[in-house]
Amino acid sequence: YIMYDVNWGWLMRVLHFNGASFFFVFMYFHVFKGFFYGSYRMVLVWMVGVVMMLVFMGVGFMGYVLVNAQMSYWAAVVITSLMTVIPWFGVNLVYFIWGGYSVVSLTIKFFFVLHFLLPWFCVILIMLHLMFLHYTGSSSLLFCFGNCDKISFFPYYWLKDLLGVLVVIFLCMFSCFMPFILGSE
């Protein structure tokens, strides 16, 4: 529907799934940087970050299922069936998620609702992540935690933010000129 009937809908969809792919790449770089800098020692920041990563992976999985193609159907069947190993209520949980005894249209609606609502939960997790980071202070490669190694906003962070804007422009150009190179279509 959005690809053919909505004005510029194809661009919104392409920006959405290419942006999600780039988001996961940058998220994994962020996690690897945390390993390298030893950020796991800041336990609250690290734990909220891990929960955030798992929730974002769930949101990405639900978005993948919303394509409603053969691969996404079987991904939904296989991944949700993994919950049947939970003792006592695993099978009933899977039937609840499926909305019946197999993946049906109710499953797609359920995943669509969660795909919309869980990012709002992630906003709360991001705020917690930043709050704990502000409380503990961030880690650096030199492990300096005093005020002696601070740098000014201009030009250093200004240039870093400019780089972020350039990445967004690159994403838009990438989505316009090579829209389906990262997808499975």
Image (cartoon, rainbow, N blue to C red):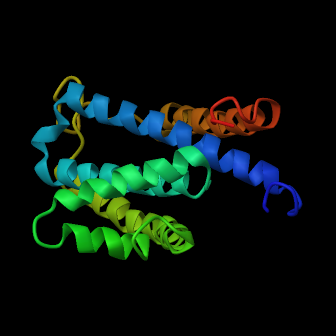
Residue farthest toward the front in the current orientation of the protein: 101
In the depicted structure, whether residue 115 falls above or below residue 75:
below
Q: Quadrant of residue 181?
A: top right
Where does residue 86 sit, x and y in percent of width and height?
15, 62
Residue at point 79% right, 62% down? 1
Residue at point 27% right, 53% down? 82
- Is residue 42 shown to the viewer in this render? yes
In the depicted structure, whether residue 21 falls above or below residue 131:
above
**Depth order, front residue of 157/177:** 177
Where does residue 2 sit, x and y in percent of width and height?
78, 60
In the depicted structure, whether residue 180 falls above or below residue 19:
above
Residue at point 85% right, 63% down? 6
**Depth order, front residue of 98/22:** 98
Residue at point 46% right, 40% down? 24
**Across the whole image, how many numbered discs are drawn on residues?**
0
Q: Is residue 171 left or right of residue 7?
A: left
In the depicted structure, whether residue 147 falls above or below residue 47:
above
Where does residue 34 sit, x and y in percent of width and height?
25, 34
Q: Is residue 138 left or right of residue 157?
A: left
Where does residue 17 sit, x and y in percent of width and height?
62, 46
- Is residue 52 shown to the viewer in this render? no
Q: Quadrant of residue 95?
A: bottom left
**Depth order, front residue of 111/137:** 111
Q: Is residue 115 left or right of residue 10?
A: left
Quadrant (top left/top right/bottom left/bottom right) for the C terminus: top right
Q: Quadrant of residue 4?
A: bottom right
